[in-house]
Amino acid sequence: MPVGRTATLLREVFGASVSQGFLAGLLASAAGQAEPFLDQVRRMLVAAPVAHFDETGVRVGGRLRWLHSASDHELTLLGVHPRRGNEGIDAVGVLPDFTGVAVHDGHLPYRQYDAIHALCNAHHLRELTAVTERDPTQRWAADLAVLLQETNVHAYLARAAGRSSLTDQQLGWLRDRYDQLIVQARSANPRPPLTGLRGAPRLGVTGSLVRRLDERRDEVLRFATDLKVPFTNNQAERDVRPAKTQLKISGCHRSETTAKA
């Protein structure tokens, strides 16, 4: 809630007339006392077997800053930093020492850390749907989306039954079918020929997706080979949503200090 609305609430509900400046001072004071708690959250997330990571833009003092998140099913740690990449990730203090499974959307700086990586399949489903909408002849995209969704159902049922992974038969069929669809995708989207100019030719949106699904297939299918890993990175996206809602209401944070508090 905005500070002004909070002051109104306190006055109307409790009969306590307080100034907005007083409430802003409480925020800074509380943030200063939270450091031991935040250190403990940081240590617990570093030790977690699976954690989610994400980042989103926020406005601070009229400038673009980045809200970084690290979380599991119980804990969420947020940090504001001028940089979107490794500097901002390091400032949160989880991923540099994390050795579990890091679930994320494929943001390139996450690759710099020695974690086991798992990619968000909610992103892949959206991208596969877009491929089909752009070109209905690319049947592999719809078939791959169905394969991922059906495998997620099997993973859910196996998890509910107390199993730690799918059966060897299920995994063998999954990998064979996945390989078949990637071959179809490669055939429908061949790499562009070399031009002799510096750098590799651009693959385009669909070509880049096919390359990622091919080269990162273990990370795409991590949810099936390790049932501790969820199908999506929705946990992290839910964690940053309240901050985005606050910005829609209040517009921006006035200062770096207030944003961090």
Image: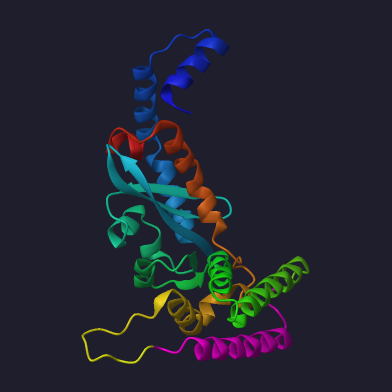
- Name the residue: 41% across, 31% down: 250
Picture coordinates of residue 92, whole percent (x, y)? 36, 53
How many marks can you see?
0
The image quarter in which residue 246 lies? top left
Main SS, magenta residues: helix
The image quarter in which residue 147 lies? bottom right
Coloring basis for residues: rainbow
- Name the residue: 40% across, 66% down: 107
In this rendered view, identify the residue nearer to me: 205 or 50. 205
Picture coordinates of residue 99, whole percent (x, y)? 45, 69
Picture coordinates of residue 256, whole percent (x, y)? 28, 39
**Residue 246 drawn in magenta:** no
**Residue 177 drawn in magenta:** yes
Which segment is the magenta one?
163-191
The image quarter in which residue 185 lies? bottom right
Q: Is residue 210 left or right of residue 64?
A: right
In this rendered view, identify the residue nearer to me: 62 or 111. 62
Q: Which residue appears farthest toward the right when viewing the image? A: 161
Q: Is residue 157 left or right of residue 232?
A: right
Q: In the picture shown, does residue 184 fall above or below 102?
A: below
Which quadrant does the C terminus fall into? Answer: top left
Query: Can residue 218 be seen by looking at this rendering?
Result: yes
- Name the residue: 42% across, 23% down: 3
Q: In the picture shown, does residue 223 fall above or below 179?
A: above
Picture coordinates of residue 154, whole percent (x, y)? 73, 73
Query: Can residue 163 be seen by looking at this rendering?
Result: no
Q: In the picture shown, does residue 154 fall above or below 175?
A: above
